[in-house]
Amino acid sequence: MATQDRKNTGARPEEQEEEPVPAQASAADTAQVTDTTAGVDDLLDEIDGVLESNAEEFVRGFIQKGGQ
Amino acid sequence: MTSSAVGPEPERFSVHRVMGTETEYGIIAPGIPDANATVLSSQVVNAYAATLREGLGNLAGTRWDYTDEAPLTDARGWQVGRQSADPSQLTDEPQILTAEQIAMVDREADSAESSVLMNLVLANGARLYVDHAHPEYSSPEVTNPLDAVLWDRAGDAVALAAMKRIAATPGFSPVHLYKNNTDNKSVSYGSHENYLVPRSVPFGRLTAALLPFFVSRQAICGSGRVGLGALNQEPGFQLSQRADFFENDVGLETTVRRPIINTRDEPHAVAEKYRRLHVIIGDANLSEVSNYLKLGTTSLVLSLIEHQAFPSVEVLEPVRELQAISHDPTLRHRVRLADGRQVTALDLQEMYLEAALVCRERQGGADEQTEDVLHRWQSIIAVLRQNPMDAADRLDWVAKLKVLEAYRSRDSLAWDDSRLALIDLQYSDLRPEKGIYHRLARRGDMEVLVSEERVQAAVSEPPRDTRAYFRGKCITNFPREVVGASWDSIIFELPSQRRLQRIQTREPLRGTAELTERLFEESADAQEFVSRLLSSPESNVAP
């Protein structure tokens, strides 16, 4: 089992160069997502229609007690 | 069936085992900003009871049998004293409302005898109750992840029915419910999973094998959260709703000092044979594929543990890595292992997947649902490696992020804009016309695994292959005589008997349709049913 681990996954970190991960880089900061967002304009229109009206006040008002 | 069978065919490597989910819902009454959440939660339970009363005529609600609750028993081998326990740990005592609170729930309540219900055991075998300041739905026991998804969705349908009832009742302010895990101010509440595991598996082995898996599975089943830190101190987006609220690797608590591995040892079953692994780290999932993979892959990992075939891997600082993984939605963060390697969350998931594939090969294949989970697990890891946003039709965090990024792009919003926080919150709104997840599903943007018809049926029908069947059918068929119930007992009050009859159901895999359906069909009333049950030579419900 240990040998298999090394064979299948141990190689990857060595292959890649160490790159610093940008702070809060979003998966969407890549070109690929622009194609995706182009298709969602009509989705946003739909969501615009149902979003609670005063965002700041609504979000501020959502207070919960701790649970498990 | 072997003596500690935790599922059908327990020797086989598979996703099948007794399991269930518990969901604490977020709750507000927008019309009453300082409403007491315990009172609101009671309104939910009572509103649901009211919908049942109309359907069935004479449902009084069923008292929960607290006899077998043991919240202070630690799986590592000790008991916490009541004095040193946090009050929130004392879940073996019923919650009590003040007279004033009772009045807010049921205007007609006689102050001498409260008719306000804090607990309902449902016809589908589930429990709907007030867990401190949240309504909670505990699903009936099922034997596989797909059924778990179905009866979990049934809970959302129950919650929605209660909400609608409140909205339609004059004099009551509407209540909104959210299937999420934080208010993004400082507070978190849970979506728990339960899995039956043989008692013979040492708890230390479970802990060691599960820690790296739990630290990394959020890459697949995280629900996404706008904001970083337990106090929402930094702007941004992260994979998991729950990650920032965890502080320990292992522990008994669930409301403070939350541990990745919870050691609660309360099997609600024959303790010598069974352990109920109580998992508190998961996010509430609306996406059915996310939920299915969460339950399915975890069950597979437990099967690996039972077969002593889990990968040998140790994460150096699990809590720190849990949060670091969550805070990097590009999935590139490298986790430090004890052996010096640095691997990503997907690499960790892949170690478990590969071990699972080996196990499956060794036994020459697996059943249909196990094959399906394995296939989807493999496929989702590949998609996440290639382009995470392609998983928007299957994973909650990706679906949510896709909407968020679209708004950011269209309206030039920074991560601390309250509209993004609102989208995060409203993603989990249970109302089908308002909830963003539900809108996505309705448009066909989300992959759905169970039909609406099956969900509606699961609201009142129990699973047929666990003791949930017995529980649910007792409540449906004998609503007047069943005066108490719990996971492992049903209490009958029979006209002919002075004392209450407590029927123990300590075997989760008995009390099934196969063993008891005929008994229900052939008994004219509760009296006859109980007599036949107790005099039966077969062990229909007893061990």
Image (cartoon, coloured by chain):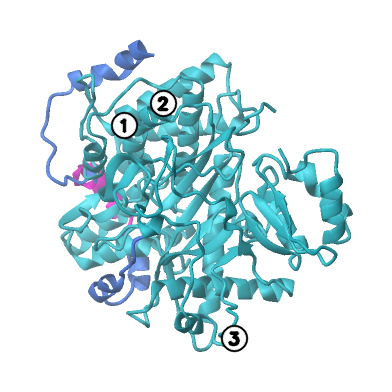
Chain colours: A blue, B cyan
Amino acid type at circle 3 is Asp
Is residue A64 placed above or below B505 in the rendered structure?
A: below
- Residue drawn at x 22%, y 45% is B327
Mark 3 closeness class: few <14, some 14–19, many ≥20 residues within 10 Å:
few
Pick whichever of labels 2 and 1 is earlier in the sequence. 2
Pick whichever of labels 1 and 3 is earlier in the sequence. 3
Task: Give me the disc on residue B346.
Answer: 1
Q: Secondary structure at mark 3?
A: loop
Task: Give me the disc on residue B110.
Answer: 3
Magenta-highlighted residues: A28-41
Chain under disc 2: B
- Residue drawn at x 40%, y 53% is B82
Residue B353: x percent and y percent? 42, 26
Amino acid type at circle 2 is Arg
Q: Are marks 1 and 3 on the same chain?
A: yes
Marks 1/3: CA distance?
Answer: 58 Å
Marks 2/1: CA distance?
Answer: 22 Å
Residue B312: x percent and y percent? 35, 20
Is residue B365 placed above or below B504 in the rendered structure?
A: above
Q: Are marks 2 and 1 on the same chain?
A: yes
